[in-house]
Image (tube, helix red, strand yellow):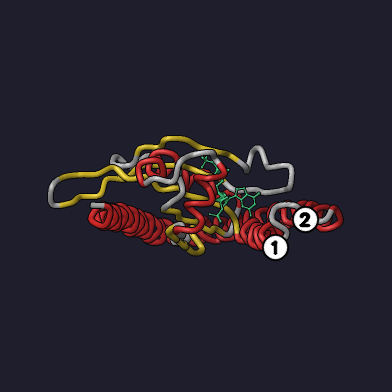
């Protein structure tokens, strides 16, 4: 009957979303472990913080319709890459690629594709490194490879992206010219800030390295 068809779909929706939320848990733990290992080995914390989210049903339907797809669970699994999304925020630009490499090297993670908006920023000024990966989720009846979109960017880039997202949402993607110009100029400032913070950090690290070298020499004498 039509009703039981509806229930089947609800079950299918629930088990699909369960897979995505399990994949998020699993990738969160993985990244946390890698970050902790880094702290232990090098006394350095490459990741400032991590956030994750499941795309809302409204947003899933909107994206499918925009892409001209019929709204079905099969289409959503096949066409949407960011139902499960995780955002890794780091302090310095120099952390982005090592974090991305560290993730890509994990034996159980497969990188499906990458969009490098760090090397090739969007015309609006958006910068972020995106990877779509699959990670296995182990269920009682076997393993299910599940897609997760990972975004990696600095605190400054994230600050910019949140405001831009808010403005784009508010004006449904058609913000007045003056706001777009202002945003672009903020993106240039973000670039400059990231570069300055990076070189300041390099200077601090050089001093620390020198202190370590002197200590080591003293110990040898
Ligand atoms: P929301 O509300 O964050 O979920 P693809 O995934 O390759 O099929 P898509 O979706 O265009 O195609 O991929 P892309 O370019 O990697 O963008 C995915 C996500 O990146 C977006 O998800 C945003 O979160 C973020 N993003 C991309 N471009 C911009 C931008 O110009 N400004 C901001 N603030 N964020 C951006 P959603 O579903 O669009 O939005």
Residue 123, placed above or below residue 30: above
Residue 67: numbered disc: none
Task: Tell me whether circle 2 and circle 1 mark residues in contact (CB < 8 Å).
Answer: yes
- Tell me: is circle 1 under 8 Å from ligand 1: no
Left-right relation of 143 to 119:
left
Disc 2 is placed on an element classified as loop
* Picture quadrant where residue 182 is located: bottom right
Identify the residue under disc 2.
175
Disc 1 is placed on an element classified as helix
Whole-angstrom CA distance, mark 2 to mark 1, is: 8 Å
Which residue is nearer to you in this view: 126 or 153?
126
Left-right relation of 129 to 28:
right
Q: Residue furthest top?
A: 112
Q: N-terminal of the two: label 2 or label 1?
A: 1
Residue 184 in percent (x, y) is at 79, 51
Q: Residue furthest front?
A: 1
Q: In which quarter of the image is the C terminus?
A: bottom left
Q: Residues within 10 Å of mark 1 (few under 14, many from 20)?
A: few
Residue 204 in percent (x, y) is at 62, 60
Residue at the spot x=55%, y=38% of the render? Answer: 115
Identify the residue under disc 1.
170
């Amino acid at each position: 009957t039509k009703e039981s068809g509806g229930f089947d779909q609800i079950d299918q929706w629930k088990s699909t979303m369960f897979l995505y939320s399990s994949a998020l848990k699993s990738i969160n733990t993985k990244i946390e472990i890698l970050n902790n290992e880094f702290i232990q080995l090098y006394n350095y914390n490459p990741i400032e913080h991590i956030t994750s989210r499941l795309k809302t049903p409204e947003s899933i339907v909107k994206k499918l319709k925009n892409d001209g797809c019929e709204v079905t669970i099969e289409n959503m699994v096949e066409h949407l890459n960011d139902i499960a999304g995780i955002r890794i925020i780091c302090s310095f630009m120099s952390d982005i690629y090592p974090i991305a490499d560290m993730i890509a090297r994990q034996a159980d993670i497969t990188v499906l594709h990458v969009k490098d908006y760090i090397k090739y920023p969007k015309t609006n000024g958006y910068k972020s490194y995106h990877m779509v990966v699959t990670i296995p989720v182990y269920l009682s009846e076997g393993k299910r490879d599940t897609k997760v979109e990972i975004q990696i960017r600095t605190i400054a880039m994230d600050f910019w992206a949140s405001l831009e997202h808010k403005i784009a949402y508010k004006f449904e993607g058609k913000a007045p010219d003056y706001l777009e110009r202002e945003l672009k100029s903020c993106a240039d400032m973000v670039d400059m800030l990231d570069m300055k913070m990076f070189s300041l950090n390099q200077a601090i690290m050089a001093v620390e390295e020198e202190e370590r070298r002197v200590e080591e020499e003293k110990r040898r004498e």
